[in-house]
Amino acid sequence: MLIGNHVSSSGGYYAMGETALRLGANTFAFFTRNPRGGKAKEIDPADVEKFLRLAGEHSFGKLVAHAPYTLNPCAADKRVRQFAKETFLDDLRRMEYTPGNYYNFHPGSHVKQGADTGIALIAELLNEVLTPEQTTTVLLETMAGKGSEVGRTFEELRAILDRVEQKEKMGVCLDTCHVWDGGYDIVNNLDGVLQEFDRVIGLERLMAVHLNDSLNECASHKDRHARIGEGKIGLEALVRVIRHPRLRRLPFILETPNDDAGYRREIALLRSRCVETEEDS
Ligand code: FE
Ligand code: FE
Ligand code: ZN
């Protein structure tokens, strides 16, 4: 099973890889720069090389990098959209140091412009930054629908994907807390939710999972993450997610409120509950 958590990127790639191993992880997520925005540190090729060797030795799965929260491709303010574009371009350039991984982002908040305008602006930005040469796959994250967030429904994500020219560079990251808060009942009807995802988007586009419990009820539109087993989704429903035949090979990323010891415990717990078969080894 591929599982990991968000690790601090301040020490570089090799340090992230070592942290992941220490926590029992074989993939991880990291913010490409300060999650609240700002300038990124330049990448050290020697550090990347050391990391790639380590990742190879330990059979790491694909990494799931996360764009800063302040990146809003569908902001009403043109300068905010310009910042989103510049950040996106710089992040995609830096992602190529570690080829073939994932870059996940929140589609954004349309702030009173309406979802349709939001969708058009998000697709417009993607069409300006994606290239046929890039090896990174860009993931749209499923959102809880807090405020004017775009991407609460599978239909909105599909509408964005439909407008993107470089479709083969795009995928979706399903956040269990967000879909639950968004109104998809993964506790009582995981199969139904995945069928709906397949019907609207296509399960072949689902490339990663943010594995979080939620402090709130289904359809609360709150987006407050809880530790695994301490929220309204609960451990057993999350175990069904990691064991699901259509999901079990995806990278699972924990975004739970934890320190390192807590992440190590959650990773060990989930590993003890997943089912490995012959074909996984
Ligand atoms: Fe996210
Ligand atoms: Fe998430
Ligand atoms: Zn969230």
Image: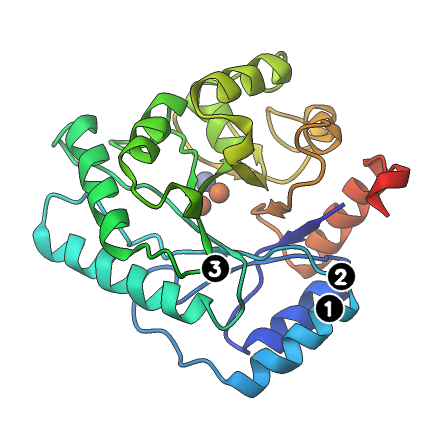
Judge from the rendering whether residue 198 lies leftward or rightward of residue 269; answer left or right: left
How much space separates mark 2 and mark 3, taking CA atoms? 19 Å
- Give, as a three-letter code, the residue at label 3: Thr
Residue 59 circle label:
2
In terms of image quadrants, where is residue 247? top right
Report x, y in % for residue 218.
Answer: 49, 18
Is 138 rendered above or below residue 205? below
Q: Is residue 274 left or right of residue 4?
A: right
Quarter occupied by residue 275? top right
Residue occupying the point 73% across, 46% down: 266
The residue under label 1 is 56
Mark 2 or mark 3, which has the lower sequence index? 2
Circle 3 is placed at which residue position?
A: 135
How far across and down, in percent of the image, does residue 76 sit? 11, 43
Q: Using a 10 Å C-alpha cutoff, classify the residue at mark 2 as few (fewer than 14 neighbours), some (14 to 19) or many (20 or more).
A: few
Callout 1: SS: helix
Q: Nearer the viewer, mark 2 or mark 3?
A: 3
Q: CA distance from mark 1 to mark 3?
A: 18 Å
- Residue sitting farthest toward the front: 132
Asked whether the residues under the numbered discs 2 and 1 touch, taking CB atoms below 8 Å apart as contact, a structural biologist would say yes
Image quadrant in which you'd find residue 250 = top right
Tell me which image quadrant ligand 1 sits in. top left
For image coordinates 48% across by 27% down, the residue present is 179
Residue at the spot x=85%, y=40% of the render? 279
